[in-house]
Structures are given as structure tokens and as C-alpha cells.
Amino acid sequence: MSTETFTSAVATTRLQRLPLQNQQSLRAWDAADELLLKHIASQQLVQANSKVLLINDHFGALSVNLAAVNVANISHWGDSYISQLATTHNLQANQLDTSLHYLSSVAPLTESYDLILIKLAKVTALLETQLNGLAAHLNDGGNIIAAGMCKHMPMSTYKVFERFIGSTNTSKAEKKARLIFPKVEQLQKQELPYPISFTEPSLDLSLSNHANVFSKESLDIGARFFIDQFQQLPAAQNIIDLGCGNGVLGIIAKRIMQQNRIDSHIHFVDESFMAIASAQQNYQQAHQQSKDASFYHSECLSQLPDLPVDLILCNPPFHQQHSTGDYIAKRMFSQSYERLKPQGQLWVVANRHLPYAPYLKNIFSRCNTIAKNNKFVIYQLVK
Ligand code: SAM
């Protein structure tokens, strides 16, 4: 069966994941999308004039299927810029109206909806923030339905729904997916601990992290080991923090350049809205200014303007949503090579068990190991 043709209970559409790959084995939807659309169709929960909020619709499977049956008022809310790109891409590929409302995870909702459909977030803190944000945004008589794969639904997931919305019922599992039907009993804003702040005394740095930011409660040990080597960084003016998370790598790199009296500009890049918002706030707090830094929502380096790039720092991701793999990391490495000036450098921290070295050596003219310990290795790649 094609990995791109999705026949749901409401429509047949063609869906692709972004970034596009030559040999894509993973589909852009899952059994939870299928089950959710089947339920909506059988219960006739949506009409052309319904106001629908879709949360975490990763590659736009729900958006495209609802647009295909002429639902005109769709809002798409999540923490992923790639999800927005993929949804537009898939709407266009199916010749559908692309004018849906994209809402970033760091902007509160301003309207209310008849139907709210939630694909479960991987990170519980993000789900909590999203459910908390729904207070006062469901129209009278409206429905909230969540969907996910059973293996991503521990008991604690139901507890989150009970805490923020009300008691839950569930559907039967189908193809290892399940729906959650929370009864709307207590949809009121609660105090949440996000963003989480902590101080890293050894770096003399405070960091504040939104709910979906990588390593939000303490400094990542890979990042820590990486930063320990930053005194060896080359002098650099344009520096990219690729997959910046809370921005810690770029913030410390800026400090090192300042200590060496080098004027530098740091370009922070991430596909997560919460990561970029956190990096922006942390940079401002650490350097008491917001100049000399730019912040980009981008799929790897695809959305960056042309720059004479001297240095790229990268602690790469090893998963996209729920699927693990090295495709995104390798894409970051090959795009880095394209973007660097001659003699420019990419510095990477990686888990030692990940076989990045042969790939990196194939692209770059030099690959040096700057440091390693029992868990991590740091590569310096020279163009
Ligand atoms: N640099 C931070 C650190 O060292 O703590 C975060 C590193 S974390 C391992 C990887 C980051 O890459 C995450 O913030 C994630 O949102 C981001 N990311 C994942 N896929 C991406 C993509 N395709 N394009 C841009 N950023 C991406």
C-alpha cells in the first residue's frame, strides 16, 4: 500500500511528511488520525460552518481531511513550525484552500470553538499547557476529543485530562489507537510551573524554559560537556546555534567571543516555537540586550537568509515526534556544510553510540575529535 495515500472515513487524500525524503517509509498519519476521523464521521460531529481547533496535527492529516469536506474554519495550534509547513504543503498537494489559521504554542487562544481535536503531545508538560489553555475557548455544547496510540497513553495521560477538563471515557482500541472523551466539568485556568527556571552556578547563568523545551529542568549533560570545550572555539563572527532549544550553546559562545574581544552575531534556529521563545528570553537575560542575535523558526537551516557563516554549533535531535532516527541530524550536518564559508567549522556533540563520524568525514574535508568521555564525543568539522 502507498505510504502517501490516506483513505479515511471522510476523504481520500495524499499526505507527505516533511522534510521530504527520497525513500520515505514512515507515513504522515497514524491509526489515531484514522480512528478520530471515523468517529467524527459516524457521529456527524462536524459541519461546514463548525469552528474547529486542531492541536498537534503533526503533518496536517486532520486539517487536510476536514478541509477536503469543506470545513472552512480550522485553526491549527501546536509547537512545531515543521507541522505548519507540512500542513500547508499537504493542503496544496490536494488542491485545497490553504487559508487555515496557524496559532503558535506560545500565543494564547483568543477565540472559542465548537470542536477541539487533540493529538496527544509527546511531552506531558506540553499537553498540560495546551489543556490549560483551553479554558473559556469551548463553545456551549462543544466537544473535546483526544486521540493517540495506546503505547503513548499511560494512566498518567488520563489523569492530566481529569485534572484539566473532567472525568474521561475512552473508545475501544483499534489498530492500537484509542480515543479519549473528557467530560467538560472544570475547564478553568490553573497555575502551572512553566516556564521552568533554573540557575547553573558553574556557568553563572539562569535559564527559563517553556513546557516543550528540551532538557527544561536542568542543563543537558551532553550540552554541559560540549560547553566545557568552548574555550577552544575558533574566532567567529556569524555563529549559528542549530537546534538551539533554550539557547544555552549560543549564549555561552557569545560570552566566549566577548571575552576574546570578537564582535559576534548569534543566529538561533529551532523548529519549536517554545524553544525560540525561551532562547530569546534567555539571551536577553544573559546579555542584557537583544541586538547581536537573530531568532529563526526553521526546518533545519532551510528558512535562513544567506549569511557568511563562520561557525555552527549543534547538539542534534535524534527523533521527530515519536519516531527516532538520524535523518534530521544528518540533514543538519549536510545543510551546515552548504552554509559554511570556506574553512568554516561545524562543532557537534553526539552520543558515542551514534555512528555520525563516517557520514561527517564523507562531507567535510577535516574531522577532528575535540573531546570524548564515556557517553559523548565532540567533533570539529572543517569545510
Ligand atoms: N541546543 C540545545 C541544547 O544543547 O540543550 C537543544 C538540543 S536538542 C537535542 C535538539 C533541538 O533541535 C530541539 O530543541 C528541537 O526542537 C530542535 N529540532 C529538532 N528537529 C529540528 C528541525 N528539523 N529543524 C530545526 N530544529 C529542530
Image (cartoon, rainbow, N blue to C red):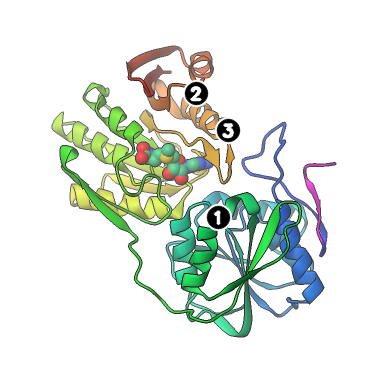
Left or right of 301 on screen, residue 168: right
Q: Report crowding for label 1: few under 14, some 14 to 19, many 20 or more residues within 10 A (C-alpha).
A: few
Cα distance between the residues tagged 1 and 3: 23 Å
Q: Is residue 81 above or below residue 165?
A: above
- The reply to whether residue 289 is in sight is no
Q: Quadrant of residue 76?
A: bottom right
Asked if labels 3 and 1 touch by Cβ distance under 8 angstroms, the answer is no
The x, y position of residue 298, in whole percent, is 49, 46
The x, y position of residue 80, in whole percent, is 52, 53
In front: 352, or 232? 352
Q: Tell which tag, 1 or 2, sits nearer the viewer.
A: 1
Q: Which mark is residue 62?
A: none
Residue beneath label 2, please? 354
Residue beneath label 3, please? 325
Earlier sequence position, callout 2 versus callout 3: 3
Q: Report crowding for label 2: few under 14, some 14 to 19, many 20 or more residues within 10 A (C-alpha).
A: few
Q: Which residues are magenta?
A: 1-8
Residue found at the very far bottom of the displayed protein: 140
Left or right of 199 on screen, residue 379: right
Cα distance between the residues tagged 2 and 3: 10 Å
Asked if labels 2 and 1 touch by Cβ distance under 8 angstroms, the answer is no
In what element is the residue under mark 2? loop
Residue beneath label 1, please? 154
The x, y position of residue 69, in whole percent, is 79, 69
Earlier sequence position, callout 1 versus callout 2: 1
